[in-house]
DNA sequence: CAGTGGTCTAGACCACTGT
DNA sequence: CAGTGGTCTAGACCACTGA
């Protein structure tokens, strides 16, 4: 029953040719985002039953798409009333994004300055964090990350070397996540983050081009793949005057 | 088809008497958390089909419960392999919790010292944040929040006065969220948060009992109800040496 | 009251994992 | 290959909102 297509004539804008490679609910989701983009905050979406009919999917499938949009903060559902478009000024930081995507979402152009790449033994601390023996090798990367050419954060990343052979040969001025995905087939699935405040020391002040002892955020992140194997250990220091962390948090989704 | 009960004899521990007030998938979720609590990190759960049979629900309903647990970080699902228990050491900060719950999760006993409560006009800034006219009244609350008696954060909260008459007569040393829920029937559904770093000034240093210019986190929060009407505007300053923010973020759930 | 989202079912096929 | 989670359907009733 899954590969069916409604071969009906084109009605309105909502006709969907389903690509059998991608889940229907995902294609519906993508289409809905386009629709929402043309609407205003507070506008009501057509009812679930109506949308399901328009897209030619069952209501359950349509609901999967809308549920995803509700979690991501695109729309809000209210039983008995309807589904409404939400103000999207707050960035959706519950989803895992790299610096590059993150900056793109804020309208900046991301770039990097590579300070150091080396292949070294993990040592006790990193070995523990990445679940390696201390003798195993890791790639150690230090970068300054910039938005429209302005230094935004200092990044120190360590990755198990056996997962990413020749990583030091890669263009590390670009998005590391993109390199991991395309070159090594490694996809980050989730990450644990710990956010603490600090003040920058002299070296950090110089690299970030801010006064010494300026407030900054330390974001420590351990990234995992789908099987929750540790992929990366990263410590980023964000300048506090030009960067904040925005979250939408919900009461039990 | 909804109110049915399997009146079969008790088999194993998983028999469920369904309370018709609560959604089945929620009751299943609750029961599953109890089961998971007795298991170890990495243990595999029974298959979805098996669990559905045990609980006497359809597989879709069972999946709703497990999906919720996966989002909340209790379990991880891997197609083709199974569903596995996840290490729960990282606190689940994607869910909206008050300071009281937050501290309880970390094993501390929360308390407050009330510094000020007053009923004042909202003014231009708060009027804008809470969508009120500047003349409308708000309750303005300032508290020091403590964990096991140690000052952890300074809290400044403003709420529209018409939603919470006589709020200044309430025991504000206790959980505000609890008062809102029980006394006024107001439930926070979601909140937008912005996190920035800072250093404490002299007054803040005194109240938090830390050295002047110590690093701290400013958390600005606007809380909304289910209809996304603003309920509270809060600015909290957390000391950086004893408090951090932990997040689990995922790639598109 | 009509219309909305919320829940639930039974059964089916697909995609993936590990042996 | 068997077994797992992932997707999908068609139809039903419930709970809630707003006029």
Image: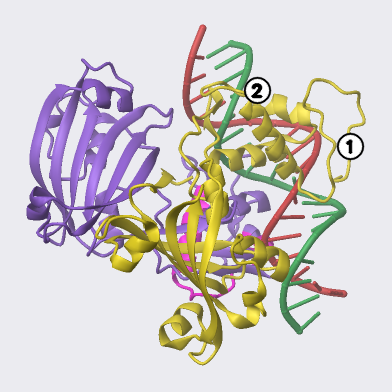
Chain colours: A yellow, B purple, C green, D red
Residue B241 image position (x, y, % from top left): 22, 64
- Tell which circle, 2 or 1, labels the residue nearer the N-terminal end: 1
Q: Report the label total.
A: 2
Image quadrant assignment for residue B155: top left
In this view, the residue in front, B40 or A253, is A253
Q: Which mark is residue B106?
A: none
Q: Is residue A189 above or below residue A80?
A: below
Q: Dividing the image into 4 quarters, which one contains the N terminus of chain A?
A: top right
In this view, the residue in front, A33 or B164, is A33
Image quadrant assignment for residue A31: top right
Q: Residues within 10 Å of mark 1 (few under 14, many from 20)?
A: few
Same chain, labels 2 and 1: yes
Q: Which mark is residue A5?
A: 1
Region rendered in magenta: B24-51
Q: Which mark is residue A46?
A: 2
- Seen at 41% across and 50% down, the residue is B95
């Amino acid at each position: 029953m899954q590969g069916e297509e409604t071969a009906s004539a084109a009605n309105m804008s909502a006709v969907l040719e389903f690509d059998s490679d991608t889940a229907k609910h995902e294609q519906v989701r993508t289409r809905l985002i386009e629709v929402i983009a043309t609407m205003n905050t507070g506008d009501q979406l057509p009812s679930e039953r109506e949308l399901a009919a328009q897209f030619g999917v069952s209501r359950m499938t349509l609901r999967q798409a809308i549920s995803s949009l509700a979690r991501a903060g695109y729309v809000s559902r209210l039983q008995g009333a309807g589904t409404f478009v939400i103000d999207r000024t707050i960035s959706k930081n519950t989803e895992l994004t790299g610096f590059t995507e993150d900056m793109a979402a804020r309208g900046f152009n991301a770039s990097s300055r590579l300070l150091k790449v080396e292949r070294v033994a993990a040592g006790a601390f990193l070995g523990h964090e990445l679940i390696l023996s201390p003798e195993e090798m890791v790639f150690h990367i230090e970068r300054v990350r910039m938005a429209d050419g302005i230094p935004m954060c200092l990044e120190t990343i360590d990755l198990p070397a056996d997962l990413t052979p020749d990583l030091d040969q890669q263009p590390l001025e670009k998005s590391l996540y993109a390199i991991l995905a395309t070159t090594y087939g490694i996809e980050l699935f989730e990450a644990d983050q710990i956010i603490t405040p600090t003040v920058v020391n002299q070296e950090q002040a110089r690299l970030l081009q801010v006064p010494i002892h300026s407030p900054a955020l330390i974001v420590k992140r351990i990234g995992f793949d789908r099987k929750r194997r540790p992929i990366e250990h990263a410590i980023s220091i964000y300048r506090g005057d030009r960067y904040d962390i925005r979250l939408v948090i919900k009461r039990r989704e």
